[in-house]
Each structure stands twice: as structure tokens, then as C-alpha cells.
Image (tube, rainbow, N blue to C red):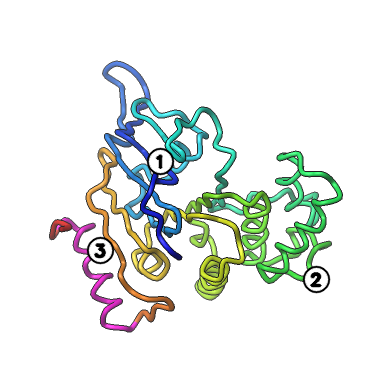
Amino acid sequence: MTLNTNTPLLELRHISQRYGSGTRQFTAVDDVNIAIQEGEFVALLGPSGCGKSTLLRIMTGLRPPSEGEVLYKGEPVRGVNPHATIVFQTFALFPWLTVQQNVEVALKARDVPMRVRGTRAVDLLDKVGLDGFENAYPRELSGGMRQKVGFARAMAVEPELLCLDEPFSALDVLSAESLRSELLELWMSGKIPTKAILLVTHNIEEAVVMADRIIVMEKDPGRVVADLRVNLPHWRQRKDPAFLTVVDQVYAVLAGQTQAE
């Protein structure tokens, strides 16, 4: 994807999130600054408890920060950002609805006319490899297929910013790898109108396989310790020495053995 160096698509300025009050106050994230440009696939990487998912909810307007400001295309975000969607770790499907109906729910919530919903839902299900499963129910699908429905539902509203909250972690190894490849194919081919993707993960190799940039966080409190650019062409090979070098660099930062330049 071609990078846009103008106003960031999304920007976090001095974001902090605290819970509780008085002496029982807990700081989840502290003074975080992040900018995401159009055309970028960014991974937010860090250990469990460092505030990655908290930041994701702040970015999309699901949670207001205790301090700081969220900007979208240079404008402050007030309430839920209508230009962003999230794919969660859990499948979060309605078990009483069919696959197609689960996708159409997102369109109905955005007041998309009924005559358009079916066509768009079927088209997206085809793009994620679920052609022929429109009338199936979630209980009839494998975990990987259910997560594909989650991706289709998130993309149905044509979000400019697609946020992924560890969406592959509940899948088996082969299903996760297949879904990663399919998402990258959609992104790199321009088959989806999404302008940027943000992936929350604790998996170093996953971040290096997929992302253009890796923002590394640490916990207690959650804060950014490195912002690394991955200058490797797609498709990336896990046994490639250049790939392994980047993995080692990221691991070293996480382990506190070095400082990013």
C-alpha cells in the first residue's frame, strides 16, 4: 500500500487511562502517543496486561481516555468513531442468526437499506471464502469459519480503519495461518476499501509477517517503548534470515535487551 504522509488517519496524543480513585488508583496506560497514516498496516505488540485492548477501545471511541486526545483526520473523536470497526478475539456472533444475517446486522445498525444489505453481505462472504455458507448457523461452522464471518461483518460497513483485537489467537495454527493470508490478500489487492489496519497481538512472528510497523508496549504502566518499521516485502517467509533478524530485534526490545533507534 502507498503511504500518505499528510494528516494522520488516526492520532493519539498523550493518552492515559486510569481506573479507581485516590490511593486505589491503577494506571492502565500512561502518556501514549501514536499516529497511523493511510495505507499502513500497524501491529500493536506487547505482553498481556500492557493496555493494548484498552488503547484499541479508546481509538475507536468505545471508551473515553482519562487524559489526552484522540484525533481522526485531524478532528477530535467524540463518542464512537463511525469510520472504525473492531474484530474481537471471541467470535461474537448471534447463534440464532444465519451467517448472512450476522453480517447484515452491522449494515442494519448503519441504516443501510434492506435491498442493499443482502447483496453486500453475500459479496463479502464470498471474498472471505464462505460462498455457499450464507444460510448456515454459527454452530455448524468451524472456529476459523466463524471468525471469517466476524471479518465479513466488520468489513461490511466499509470501515476506513479496521481494528483487530487478537483475532487469530482462539484459532488452531492452520486456521489462523490461512485467515492471516486471506486478510493480507484482501488488503494488498485493494479488494476492501479500508485505509489502514491496526492489529493488536502478543505474537511477535504474527506482527512481523503482517505489519508495516510494529509499535511495542510494556506494562506497569502500559506505555510505548519502540516504533519499528518492517522493511520486508510481502509475502514474507518465516525462515528467511532477514525475517528472523526482525523477529530477534523485536524480541530484544520486548525483553529489554536493547533500545530501538
Mark 2 closeness class: few <14, some 14–19, many ≥20 residues within 10 Å: few
At horizontal 38% and vertical 41% (from top left) the residue drawn is 11
Please identify the residue farthest to the top as the structure is shown: 22
Looking at the image, residue 207 lies above or below residue 157:
below
Kindly report the secondary structure that dominates the magenta region of the rendered protein: helix
Residue at numbered disc 2 = 132
Q: Looking at this rendering, what residue extends furthest in the right direction?
A: 115
Helix, strand or loop at label 3? It is: helix
Mark 3–mark 1 Cα distance, whole angstroms, equals 20 Å
**Most foreground residue, 179 or 229:** 229
Q: Is residue 30 left or right of residue 101?
A: left
**Could you tell me how many numbered marks the image carries?**
3
Q: Secondary structure at mark 2?
A: loop
Q: Which residue is mark 3?
A: 250
Confirm whether the magenta stretch covers residue 177: no
Residue at the spot x=64%, y=49% of the render?
92
Residue at the spot 24% in from the left edge and 64% down from the top edge: 251
Give amino acid for label 1.
Leu
Q: Nearer the viewer, residue 57 or 81?
A: 81
Is residue 172 visible from the viewing direction of this image? no
| Residue situated furthest left in the rendering | 258
Which residue in the protein does label 1 denote?
A: 55
Report x, y in % for residue 147.
62, 60
Front one among 213 and 53: 213
Q: Which residues, given as a range, are shown in magenta?
A: 239-256
